[in-house]
C-alpha cells in the first residue's frame, strides 16, 4: 500500500471514530459540536482525496509506501519510547535527579557513547546544571521520590 | 507614543535583560549551527523557563534565540554544505564553494554581516508599520478577523508542505486538537473523554516539545541508525578542513574587506525589501524570501556567472532575504494576534504564559511592552553581530559535538520543559504521546509546525466564526457581504493559485 492510501485510510477511520463515537458522546449541544463537526467533514473530504490519489499512484505502479514502522532502524528509534516510559514512571518513585543520572548513562550508551569518563562526567554534570538552574535560580521543585 | 517608547526603554535597560538576550543569541546560534537541530527547537526547549523570568527577560531570551538561530543555520551551510535551518538552504549554493576554495571565514563573515544588516532593517520596518496596521486592525470585526485567520492558515498550509493536501490536513489536525477542552460559549466539556485534566485543553508546552523536540530525536536517531553516526561524518569534514589548512594557513582568504562588503550592499538592501514584503504575508516564510532574493540578485548582478561558484553577492542575497522576513513576520502577531510562522507562534506562547495576549488593542493597553520588544529586537541584532564574530572562529568545536550528548540532553530537557510549566506529570506523558504522534506524522510528510500554528489559531478562529454567526443571526453569507472579509477570501484563493504555480515551476527547474 502506498503512503497516500495508508494515510487516507487512517484519516478516514479516525473521522468515523470522531463522527460516530467521540463527538456524540463527549460534546453536548449542536453549537458546541459545530466547529469540530465542520473539521471532521473537511478531514473526511481530504481522506477521500488521499485515497483517490493513492489509487491513481497504485495504478501507475507506485505500490509500496516510502517507509514502514517495522524496519530495523525505525524499531531501534522507537525503543526510546518504552525507555522513556520507564524513566518517567520512575521519576516520582525514585526522584528526578537520581533517576536522571541513571538514564543519562542508559541513553548515552544506547546512542553510541562508550567512554566511561564521558558517561560519568555527563551524567553528573547535566543533572547538577539542571539542579543549579531550576532549583537554585528558578526555585522550582521536581518530584523528590525516596532518593533525590 | 514617545512616553510609551521611553517607558519601554526603561523596562529594557536592566543588565538581566541584556544577559538573557545574549544567552538566547548564543544558544540559538549553537543549535542553529548543528545540522538537524534548529533555532525553533531551542525556543521550544527554553520556552517553559521563560515562565520563571520577568516578562521582558523572557521575551529577550526568545528574541535572542530566533536571531542567533537564524544566523547559526548558515554556518553548517557554508562549512559542510548542510543547511542548519531550512532557510539556509540557499546559502549553501555560494557558501560551500567558498569553503572549498579555502575562504570559509570570508563566507561566514559575509553571511553574518548580511544577516545583521537585513535583520535590523526588517525590525525598523516592523517598528514603523506596527502602529498604522494596529490602527486598521482596531476597525475590523469578527467576520474580517475569521477571514484573515483562514487566509493565514491556508497560506501556511500550502506554503509549508510539499503537497497541498498534506498542508490542509496539518491545518485541520491542528484546529481539531485546539477544540479539545471546554466550549468557549457554553462552558461544557469537549472531547476530553472524562480526563478532567484536559478541561483546559492540551497544554501548549508538552504538545510543542513532544512534536518538535522529542519527535525530532526519534527521527534523527533513526537516520543515525541508517547512515552510521552523522557526527562521525561531521567530525571527518571538520578534520579534513583543518588538515587542509582551511582555517589556519591563509588568513587573508578569511578576511572580508570593506570594499568587498560595500559591493554587496545594494544586493543586501534589495534582498531586504524582497524579504520584508514576503514577511508581512503569514506563512510564506524565510525559505521563499531567501530563494527569491537569490534569483533577483543573480538577475541584477554584473557577474551572474559567479553565482553558484562562491559569489559573495549570492551569500548576501540568501542571508539578507531570509533574515529580512523576521521583522515584518511579527506584524500580524503584534497587531492581530496571528502568528505568521512557527517562531512567531512560539513567541505568542511566551506572551500568553506571561498573561499577555497580542491583538488589535495590544498597542493601546501594553504599548510600553511592545516598544520594549522592539528595542530588544534591535539589541539582539547587536548581540548577534558581536557573539557571531567570535563564534565563527570556534564553531568547529560545536559542530563536532557527538550526537549522543545532544540527543540525551534534548530528552532530559524535553521532560523538564513539559513538567515545569504546570508541575504535572500528566504533561510529561502527554509530551511522550505527542512525540510519537509527531514522529508518525513526519513519516507521512505532514508538516508539524503547521499543526502547531493551527493549534494556536484554532480557538481564535472558532470564537470569531461563532461571533460572526451570532451578530448576523446565523447568516453564513456575512463572510461574503463584508468587503474586507470577502477581499481576504479572494486573496486566499489567489495565494493558493500563486503558491501552487510557483511550486510547480520550482519543481520543473
Image: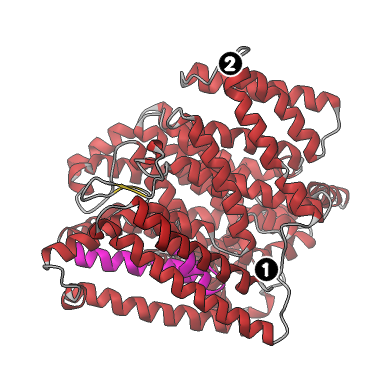
The quadrant where residue B406 appears: top right
The quadrant where residue A65 appears: bottom right
Residue at 23% of width from left, 77% of height from top?
B486
Q: CA distance from mark 1 to mark 2?
A: 53 Å
> Magenta stretch: residue B509 in it?
no
Residue B290: give x, y in percent of width and height. 54, 67
**Closer to us: mark 1 or mark 2?**
2
| Above or below, B344 relative to B167 | above
The magenta stretch is: B142-171
Residue farthest along the bottom direction in this orientation: A60
Secondary structure under the numbered disc 1 in the rendered image: helix
The dot on residue B359 is none
| Above or below, B473 relative to B356 | below
Q: Which residue is mark 2?
A: A145
**Residue B304 visible in the displayed image:** yes
Secondary structure under the numbered disc 2 in the rendered image: loop
Q: Which residue is mark 1?
A: B93
Residue B418: give x, y in percent of width and height. 51, 35
> Magenta stretch: residue B156 in it?
yes
**Parent chain of label 2:** A
Total count of labels: 2
Look at the image and tell me in which quarter the N terminus of chain A lies: bottom right
**Residue B325 visible in the displayed image:** no
Amino acid at each position: 500500500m502506498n503512503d497516500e492510501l495508508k494515510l487516507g485510510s487512517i484519516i478516514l477511520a479516525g473521522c468515523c471514530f470522531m463522527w460516530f463515537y467521540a463527538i456524540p458522546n463527549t460534546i453536548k449541544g449542536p453549537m458546541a459540536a459545530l466547529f469540530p463537526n465542520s473539521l471532521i467533514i473537511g478531514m473526511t473530504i481530504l481522506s477521500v482525496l488521499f485515497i483517490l490519489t493513492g489509487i491513481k499512484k497504485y495504478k501507475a505502479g507506485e505500490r509500496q509506501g516510502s517507509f514502514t514502522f517495522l524496519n530495523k532502524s525505525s524499531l531501534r528509534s522507537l525503543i526510546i519510547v518504552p525507555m522513556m516510559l520507564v524513566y518517567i514512571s520512575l521519576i516520582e518513585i525514585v526522584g528526578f535527579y537520581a533517576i536522571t543520572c541513571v538514564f543519562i548513562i542508559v541513553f548515552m550508551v544506547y546512542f553510541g557513547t562508550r567512554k566511561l569518563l564521558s558517561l560519568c562526567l555527563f551524567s553528573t554534570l547535566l543533572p547538577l546544571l539542571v539542579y543549579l538552574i531550576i532549583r537554585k535560580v528558578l526555585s522550582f521543585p521536581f518530584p523528590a521520590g525516596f532518593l533525590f | 507614543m514617545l512616553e510609551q517608547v521611553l517607558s519601554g526603554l526603561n523596562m529594557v535597560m536592566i543588565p538581566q535583560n541584556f544577559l538573557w538576550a545574549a544567552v538566547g543569541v548564543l544558544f540559538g546560534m549553537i543549535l542553529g549551527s548543528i545540522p538537524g537541530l534548529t533555532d525553533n527547537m531551542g525556543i521550544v526547549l527554553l520556552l517553559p523557563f521563560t515562565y520563571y523570568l520577568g516578562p521582558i527577560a523572557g521575551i529577550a531570551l526568545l528574541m535572542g534565540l530566533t536571531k542567533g538561530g537564524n544566523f547559526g543555520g548558515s554556518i553548517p551551510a557554508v562549512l559542510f554544505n548542510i543547511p542548519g535551518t531550512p532557510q539556509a538552504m540557499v546559502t549553501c549554493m555560494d557558501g560551500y564553494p567558498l569553503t572549498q576554495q579555502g575562504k570559509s571565514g570570508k563566507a561566514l563573515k559575509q553571511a553574518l554581516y548580511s544577516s545583521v544588516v537585513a535583520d535590523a532593517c526588517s525590525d525598523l520596518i516592523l517598528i514603523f508599520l506596527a502602529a498604522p496596521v494596529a490602527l486598521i486592525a482596531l476597525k475590523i470585526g469578527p467576520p474580517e478577523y475569521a477571514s484573515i485567520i483562514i487566509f493565514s492558515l491556508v497560506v501556511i498550509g500550502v506554503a509549508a508542505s510539499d503537497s497541498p493536501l498534506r498542508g490542509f490536513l496539518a491545518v485541520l489536525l491542528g484546529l481539531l486538537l485546539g477544540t479539545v477542552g471546554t466550549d468557549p460559549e457554553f462552558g461544557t466539556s469537549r472531547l476530553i473523554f472524562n480526563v478532567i485534566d484536559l478541561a483546559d485543553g492540551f497544554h501548549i508546552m508538552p504538545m510543542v516539545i513532544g512534536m518538535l523536540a522529542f519527535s525530532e530525536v526519534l527521527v534523527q536517531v533513526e537516520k543515525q541508525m541508517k547512515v552510521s553516526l552523522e557526527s562521525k561524518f561531521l567530525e571527518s569534514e571538520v578534520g579534513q578542513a583543518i588538515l587542509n589548512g582551511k582555517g589556519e594557513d591563509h588568513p587573508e582568504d578569511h578576511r572580508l574587506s570593506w570594499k568587498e562588503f560595500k559591493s554587496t550592499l545594494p544586493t543586501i538592501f534589495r534582498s531586504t525589501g524582497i524579504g520584508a514584503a514576503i514577511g508581512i504575508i503569514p506563512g510564506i516564510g524565510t525559505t521563499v524570501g531567501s530563494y527569491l532574493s537569490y534569483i533577483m540578485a543573480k538577475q541584477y548582478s554584473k557577474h551572474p556567472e559567479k553565482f553558484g561558484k562562491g559569489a559573495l553577492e549570492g551569500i548576501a542575497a540568501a542571508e539578507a532575504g531570509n533574515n529580512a522576513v523576521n521583522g515584518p513576520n511579527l506584524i500580524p502577531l503584534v497587531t492581530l494576534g496571528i502568528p505568521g510562522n512557527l517562531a512567531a507562534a512560539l513567541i505568542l506562547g511566551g506572551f500568553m504564559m506571561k498573561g499577555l495576549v497580542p491583538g488589535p488593542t495590544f498597542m493601546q493597553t501594553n504599548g510600553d511592552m511592545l516598544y520594549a520588544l522592539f528595542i530588544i529586537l534591535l539589541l539582539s541584532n547587536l548581540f548577534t553581530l558581536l557573539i557571531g564574530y567570535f563564534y565563527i572562529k570556534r564553531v568547529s568545536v560545536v559542530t563536532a559535538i557527538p550526537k549522543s550528548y545532544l540527543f540525551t540532553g534534548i530528552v532530559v530537557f524535553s521532560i523538564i520543559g513539559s513538567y515545569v510549566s504546570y508541575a504535572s506529570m500528566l504533561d510529561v506523558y502527554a509530551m511522550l504521546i505527542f512525540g510519537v504522534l509527531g514522529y508518525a506524522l513526519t513519516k507521512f510528510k505532514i508538516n508539524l509546525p503547521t499543526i502547531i500554528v493551527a493549534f494556536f489559531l484554532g480557538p481564535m478562529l472558532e470564537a470569531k466564526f461563532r461571533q460572526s454567526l451570532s451578530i448576523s443571526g446565523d447568516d453564513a453569507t456575512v463572510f461574503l457581504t463584508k468587503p474586507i472579509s470577502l477581499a481576504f477570501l479572494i486573496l486566499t484563493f489567489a495565494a493558493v493559485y500563486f503558491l501552487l504555480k510557483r511550486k510547480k515551476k520550482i519543481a520543473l527547474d
